[in-house]
């Protein structure tokens, strides 16, 4: 199997993507960048999901000499003109503080009526081969912001996001159900046919 490096040190994300690729029938040896401790973290300095995903994939491909994939994703809230967007993971100031991010976002939309609580999860998935091909695909899932957390699964903004067509939050879905409909799955399903196998 061809080894591909996922530009993350988050083992949860590596496991989730392994499951998504297996469901899609893509046979690759997917590893996280933690397998390559000398690879430096890549600052997300672009102003779009696609730009950040490609920046990370290129940096990891060049550092490891292997094909690399990366994603950048977040939640875009209609009433906040698409924010937090690329700032989703650090919306409350500290990167990855899910509880603080949720508290801040819920406070910011507390007085927004139901008909204006639209939101979407967006994911850009990028592939970079050392010295070569670059590909970016995007996936999204539309939904509504809830007024309070619901469910124990998932991570990030899952407890306050209800996908269209569902009566539960994404945190109330099983991992398998979430992976079938997620923005990440949609982005990587579009990218999968382009992966080197």
Image (spheres, rainbow, N blue to C red):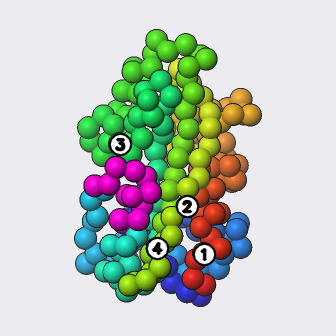
Q: Is residue 92 magenta?
A: no
In this view, 12 is above or below 80: below
Query: Quarter holding the N terminus?
Result: bottom right
Q: Which residue is at a point 53% across and 47% down the rendered structure image?
A: 122
Closer to the chain start, of discs 2 and 1, is 2
Regarding mark 4 in the picture, which secondary structure is present there?
strand
Inter-mark Cα distance, 4 to 3: 24 Å
Q: Which residue is at a point 74% across and 34% down the rendered structure image?
A: 165
Give the magenta range: 45-56
Closer to the chain start, of discs 4 and 1, is 4
Query: Quarter holding the C terminus?
Result: bottom right
Closer to the chain start, of discs 3 and 1, is 3
Q: Mark on residue 87?
A: 3
Q: Nearer the viewer, residue 57 or 101?
A: 57
Q: Which residue is at a point 62% across and 38% down the rendered structure image?
A: 142
Relative placement, left or right, of 19 versus 110 is right
């Amino acid at each position: 199997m061809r080894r591909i490096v996922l530009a993350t040190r988050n083992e949860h994300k590596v496991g989730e993507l392994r499951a998504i690729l297996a469901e899609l029938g893509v046979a690759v040896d997917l590893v996280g960048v933690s397998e390559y401790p000398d690879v430096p973290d890549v600052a997300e300095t672009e102003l779009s999901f696609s730009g950040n995903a490609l920046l990370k994939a290129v940096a990891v491909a060049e550092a490891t000499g292997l094909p690399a994939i990366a994603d950048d994703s977040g939640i875009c809230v209609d009433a906040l003109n698409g924010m937090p967007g690329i700032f989703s993971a650090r919306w409350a100031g500290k990167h990855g503080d899910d509880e603080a991010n949720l508290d801040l976002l819920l406070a910011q939309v507390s007085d927004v009526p139901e008909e204006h609580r639209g939101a979407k999860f967006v994911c850009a998935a990028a592939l970079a081969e050392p010295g070569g091909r670059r590909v970016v695909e995007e996936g999204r899932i539309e939904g509504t912001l809830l007024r309070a957390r619901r469910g124990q699964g998932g991570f990030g903004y899952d407890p306050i996001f209800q996908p269209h067509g569902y009566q539960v939050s994404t945190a109330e879905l099983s991992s398998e159900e979430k992976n079938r409909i997620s923005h990440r799955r949609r982005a990587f399903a579009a990218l999968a046919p382009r992966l080197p196998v």
